[in-house]
Image: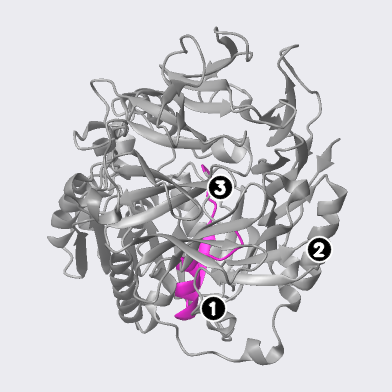
């Protein structure tokens, strides 16, 4: 079966709101309403659908892991409660219908080696500390005790098994003598009651393995490596101890397929180029051949999605896909009909429906409902009665009228390239051009945004700004040509795409040409600085956080966690060569041109950032302040590459609000 899928969901917004709501401008929600952390998260159904687990923010501000019966969600059991600000449950996963696992992060430590893994029965009993991070004396405060079988921080949770056992899969990380990040890993099965550890497969494995794909029986079948600039994948049959090469080519350059997943019948699915976009194909491991035609293609977008599989029957039920927004394609007629009923009952939102592992027997479905103006809400759907019961919202203290609508467009860059872009209008739809922010995503080889709820864009729209989020060349998800067009274009055509986005928004009558700001983190921080320097007549001010300030420092900093493999090969392909491109780096490194930046600037960085070490921020702040008095510089001592702590997010965005109000909204 083949599905050609391009399902823009933006037409849904036409009937979302009454004229009265559209005309009204509600009072401003506080900064904390957007950035205080999700009030409900990690929502997941038990394998047979009898229970639903989630983490919830309690009235006293602490976080709890709770389990509810799906037949009566008012019956709630608190499994664990973190009384410390430095502890957070970051992942919840059912091991079987009786037992659940969860990952805890020590928020005081930003680096690797601080993830703890626990397992507990759903009644709260028989808790076992499976993996110990760098907790030290703090372990007793979350109710755990070390045993001689507790694994060290060189292990990490990988996945659950799906055989009704008490086992999970864990990765053991191995480091070399150079990089901060692990060089490779190996998979093991860990019994969550006895803590007995055994290898998930027999025999040796290929070198530098970092990515694993297991089949329907949780057996490692496909692995991927990066070795001296080559991307290599291998496979093995379940009964074999030897791995065979599946795919081998120069990373980024060669046209290769990417293994993605096995279905319940142990068919391998891969993503490969089809009419310039990544599409989903079946791959026959016996014949070593990919199908001629894709099973799913999404014209205009690379295939991005995940399968829905009934683990009890092995049946492939459908796919969760992402085009301009999320959507679901069901192959199963019953689920397709249930999706239609849910969408009819919940118009105006994208309703992502998840089934339990034993889907055919599950009495409920889990709905994640979201729109551009509604934060994510979780709902249980009773398959027998059609009743819906709300479980909670990630950000319940925001109303639709307080934020603006988002839409998806394309604009022409100066060289004619079509650039995708998301635009969020100010709340209340004020007439005439408004102050605007070009919000630049990080990566840069990543997809930046989607139509659904975006806290940063929603916050800025609530404060009256037009928010422009370009998927500039070099972004992924929009075809191979779009990605390749951004290679070695830092500060050049990638930068021009941002300026062209601002000029396009002016032509649409949305943005005031005299009141446009640049903002972004990581690469977005770099682009903010470079844009202020390169286009001072266009961008009035800027906000950057965790930003690269000197391209050469990316290759030379001893504080960076970037691995040698990336610096020696991938970065030279995508960014440039420090020796061969020295002149280009000089022209496109903000640090070397700091004296040219005269506009107001807000900078922020995390003191524990290893991806973009603080020397980037320190050196640039010192250099730019020498000739620019309108520079503010924030340092958050307990943060790394971005903000994990709610109090820091609230503080930062509060300062952003004040900065933009002074230097953009009310500037002459």
Q: Earlier in the sequence, mark 2 or mark 3?
A: 3
Is residue 512 in sight in this rendering? no
x then y, percent, for residue 165 = 57, 34
Res. 478 image quadrant: top right
Q: Residue at x 62, y 10 (%)?
A: 239
| In the depicted structure, whether residue 614 falls above or below residue 663 | above
Instruction: Tell me if mark 1 has few (under 14), some (14-19) or many (20+) residues whose alpha carbon lies within 10 angstroms of its own.
Output: many
Q: Quadrant of residue 3?
A: top right
Pick the quarter of the image with the C terminus. Answer: bottom left
Quarter of the image with the N terminus in it: top right
Q: Position of residue 259 (x, y in %)?
A: 62, 27
Disc on the earlier residue, 3 or 1: 3
- Nearer to the camera, 128 or 228: 128
Judge from the rendering whether residue 78 lies leftward or rightward of residue 561; answer left or right.
right
Q: Measured along the vertical axis of the image, is residue 358 above or below residue 33?
A: above
371 shown above or below 107: below
Image: 440 above or below 436: above
Q: Is residue 514 left or right of residue 73?
A: left
- Circle 2 is placed at which residue position? 384
Say what secondary structure mark 1 lies in.
Answer: loop
At x 34%, y 68%, the residue is 62
The residue to which callout 1 is attached is: 403
Whichever of callouts 2 and 1 sits on the residue coming sooner in the sequence is 2
In the depicted view, which residue is nearer to us: 266 or 37? 266
Q: Using the numbered discs, state the Cα–Cα distance from disc 3 to disc 1 in whole angstroms.
A: 42 Å
Q: Which residue is mark 3?
A: 98
**Residue at left offset 56%, top offset 52%:** 414
Q: Which residues are the magenta region?
A: 450-474
Residue 468 highlighted magenta (yes or no): yes
Asked if residue 385 is among those painted magenta in the image, a careful observer would answer no
Q: Residues within 10 Å of mark 2 (few under 14, many from 20)?
A: few
- Disc number lying in front (2 or 1): 2
């Amino acid at each position: 079966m083949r599905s050609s899928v391009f399902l823009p969901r933006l037409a849904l917004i036409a009937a979302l709101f009454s004229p009265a709501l559209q005309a009204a401008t509600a009072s401003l929600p506080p900064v904390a309403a957007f950035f205080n952390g999700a009030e409900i998260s990690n929502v997941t159904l038990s394998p047979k659908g009898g229970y639903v687990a989630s983490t919830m923010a309690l009235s006293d501000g602490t976080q709890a892991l709770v389990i509810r019966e799906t037949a009566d969600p008012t019956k709630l059991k608190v499994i664990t409660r973190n009384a410390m600000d430095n502890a957070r449950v970051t992942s919840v996963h059912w091991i079987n219908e009786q037992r659940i696992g969860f990952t805890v992060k020590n928020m005081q430590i930003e680096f690797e080696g601080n993830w703890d893994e626990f397992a507990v029965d759903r009644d709260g009993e028989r808790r076992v500390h499976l993996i110990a991070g760098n907790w030290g004396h703090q372990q007793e405060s979350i109710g755990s005790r070390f045993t001689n079988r507790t694994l060290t921080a060189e292990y990490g949770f990988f996945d659950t098994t799906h055989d009704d056992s008490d086992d999970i899969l864990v990765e053991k990380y191995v480091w070399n003598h150079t990089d901060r990040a692990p060089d490779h890993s190996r998979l093991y099965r860990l019994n969550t009651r006895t803590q007995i550890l055994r290898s998930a497969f027999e025999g040796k494995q290929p070198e530098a393995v970092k990515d694993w794909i297991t089949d329907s029986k949780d057996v490692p079948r496909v692995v991927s490596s990066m070795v001296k600039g080559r991307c290599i994948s291998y496979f093995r049959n379940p009964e074999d101890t030897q791995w065979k090469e599946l795919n081998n080519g120069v990373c980024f350059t060669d046209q290769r397929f990417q293994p993605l997943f096995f279905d319940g019948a142990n068919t391998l699915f891969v993503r490969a180029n089809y009419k310039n976009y990544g599409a989903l194909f079946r791959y026959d491991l016996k014949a070593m051949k990919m199908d001629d035609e894709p099973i799913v293609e999404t014209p205009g977008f690379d295939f991005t999605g995940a399968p829905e599989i009934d683990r009890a029957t092995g049946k492939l039920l459908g796919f969760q896909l992402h085009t301009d927004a999320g959507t679901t394609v069901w192959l199963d007629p019953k689920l397709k009909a249930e999706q239609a009923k849910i969408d009819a009952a919940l118009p105006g939102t994208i309703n992502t429906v998840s089934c339990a592992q034993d889907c055919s027997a599950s009495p409920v479905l889990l709905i994640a409902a979201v729109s551009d103006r509604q934060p994510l809400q979780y709902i249980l759907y009773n398959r027998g009665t059609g009743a819906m019961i709300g479980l909670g919202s990630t950000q319940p203290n925001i109303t639709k009228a307080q934020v603006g609508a988002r839409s998806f467009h394309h604009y022409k860059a100066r060289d004619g390239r079509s650039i995708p872009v998301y635009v969020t209008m100010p709340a209340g739809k004020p007439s005439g051009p408004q102050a605007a922010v070009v919000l630049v995503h990080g990566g840069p080889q990543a997809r930046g945004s989607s139509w659904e709820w975006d806290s940063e864009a929603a916050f800025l729209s609530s404060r009256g700004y037009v928010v422009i989020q370009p998927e500039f060349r070099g972004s992924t998800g929009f075809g191979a040509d779009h990605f390749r067009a951004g290679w070695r274009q830092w500060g050049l055509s990638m930068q021009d795409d941002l300026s062209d986005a601002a000029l396009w928004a002016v032509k649409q009558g949305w943005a005031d040409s005299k009141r446009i700001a640049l903002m972004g983190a990581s690469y977005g921080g770099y682009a903010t600085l470079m844009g202020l320097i390169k286009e001072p007549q266009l961008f009035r001010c800027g906000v950057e956080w965790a930003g690269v300030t000197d391209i050469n420092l990316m290759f030379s900093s001893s504080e960076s966690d970037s691995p040698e493999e990336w610096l020696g090969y991938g970065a030279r392909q995508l960014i440039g060569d420090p020796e061969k491109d020295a002149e280009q780096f000089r022209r496109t490194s903000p640090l070397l041109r700091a004296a040219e930046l005269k506009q107001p600037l807000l900078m922020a960085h995390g003191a524990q950032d290893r991806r973009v070490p603080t020397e980037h921020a320190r050196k640039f702040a010192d250099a730019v302040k020498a000739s620019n008095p309108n520079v503010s510089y924030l340092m958050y001592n307990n943060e790394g590459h971005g903000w994990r702590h709610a109090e820091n997010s609230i503080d930062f965005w509060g300062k952003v609000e004040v900065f933009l109000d002074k230097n953009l909204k009310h500037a002459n």
